[in-house]
Image (cartoon, rainbow, N blue to C red):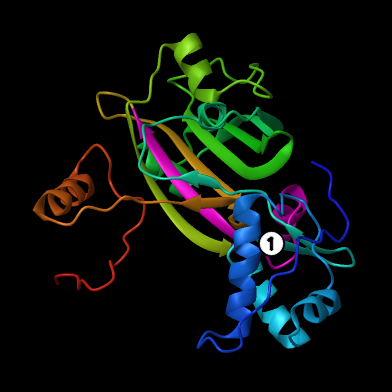
Amino acid sequence: MSATAGHKPPAAALDRELPVPLYFQLKSLLLRQIETGELRPNDRLETEDHLARRHGVSKATVRQALAEMAQTGYLRREQGRGTFVAEPRVQQGPRELTSFSEDMRGRGVRARSKVLSQGVAVADRAVAERLGLATGARVFRLERLRMADDEPLAIQIAFIPLDMAPGLAGEDFEDGSLYEVLERKCGLVAASAHETHFAALLKRTEVRQLHASPGSPGLCAERVAYLPGGRPLEYTRSVMRADRWQITLDLVRGSGAALHLRRSEESPAAPPLAPRARPGRRRRR
């Protein structure tokens, strides 16, 4: 959708008698306009001056409301161009083990990849540990820029033990799913996976490839996928645009949930990728 200049929904009065800060009232108003479709993805908002005059508040009040909305991913700010309504984020949460291509198809979005590099490589210690290989073992390495409707969303680097899938170097991964190729060509199906998410600032090359702003945060993930017998099949590192991706979790309180987490951590088929202390729990010495 093309950006529209200075979109002006009908003005709504802010109530100075309410014990609610004016910036929060303005933010709530703009959020409501986004949710109802008055402000649509890629619409350009009025300038801070215009918003301040229309709603009878100071520029500092407008600036605080817009800054919080940009921080939470509802708006994006482009140097020299203005402030725009952001595209809705891709939601991810507890689900079946699927590929990026399958995820996007499930959302009615066309998934596409740009292959940045592919070929045979030597496993360093980190890759070897996760795949249960000796350091220096040969692996197939595939680095791709993952896109949804031609918008860059993530950079993924996948590693597959070469002895399990020796014929991948000549495959076309621009439009194809790695999981689908592994199943069709090698008869290999990932049955489970262990995935860890963490935040990091995007590097300069990642900013350029993802069309992000300098200093933008990234949502990173590491996944090890396993065959039904427990042997590691794939290790993937992903860096995603944090303004276009969010993780939603459905939590259940009770002994059943705790037991499920404990089993996941102790399962020999899916060892943790890195030892991390959990908040509120001390490690036993």
Based on the displayed image, in which of its 4 quarters is residue 275 positioned?
Answer: bottom left
Decide if residue 49 is on the left or right side of residue 132: right
Instruction: Work out whether residue 52 or residue 73 is closer to the camera in this orientation and state it.
Output: 52
Q: Is residue 61 above or below residue 208?
A: below
Decide if residue 64 is on the left or right side of residue 82: left
Position of residue 149 measured from the top left corner of the image (x, y, whole percent)? 71, 33
Q: Quadrant of the C terminus?
A: bottom left
Instruction: Work out whether residue 25 or residue 206 is closer to the camera in this orientation and state it.
Output: 25
Residue visible at 58% across and 65% down in the picture: 72
Q: Is residue 230 above or below residue 277?
A: above
Q: Amino acid at mark 1?
A: Leu
Position of residue 125 measured from the top left corner of the image (x, y, whole percent)? 45, 48
Position of residue 192 measured from the top left corner of the image (x, y, whole percent)? 32, 32
Position of residue 33 measured from the top left corner of the image (x, y, whole percent)? 65, 58
Residue at disc 1, secondary structure:
strand
Decide if residue 177 is on the left or right side of residue 277: right
| 214 is within the stretch colored magenta | yes
Residue visible at 28% across and 71% down in the picture: 279
Based on the displayed image, in which of its 4 quarters is residue 81 positioned?
Answer: bottom right
Segment colored magenta:
201-226
Q: Residue furthest left?
A: 255
Instruction: Work out whether residue 89 or residue 143 is closer to the camera in this orientation and state it.
Output: 89
Label 1, on which residue? 75
Q: Quadrant of the N terminus?
A: top right
Q: Is residue 134 visible?
A: no
Q: Badge 1: few (under 14), some or many (20 or more) residues near its Cα, within 10 Å?
A: many
Decide if residue 48 is on the left or right side of residue 199: right
Tag count in the figure? Answer: 1
| 264 is within the stretch colored magenta | no
Q: Is residue 204 above or below residue 226?
A: below
Q: Is residue 157 visible?
A: yes
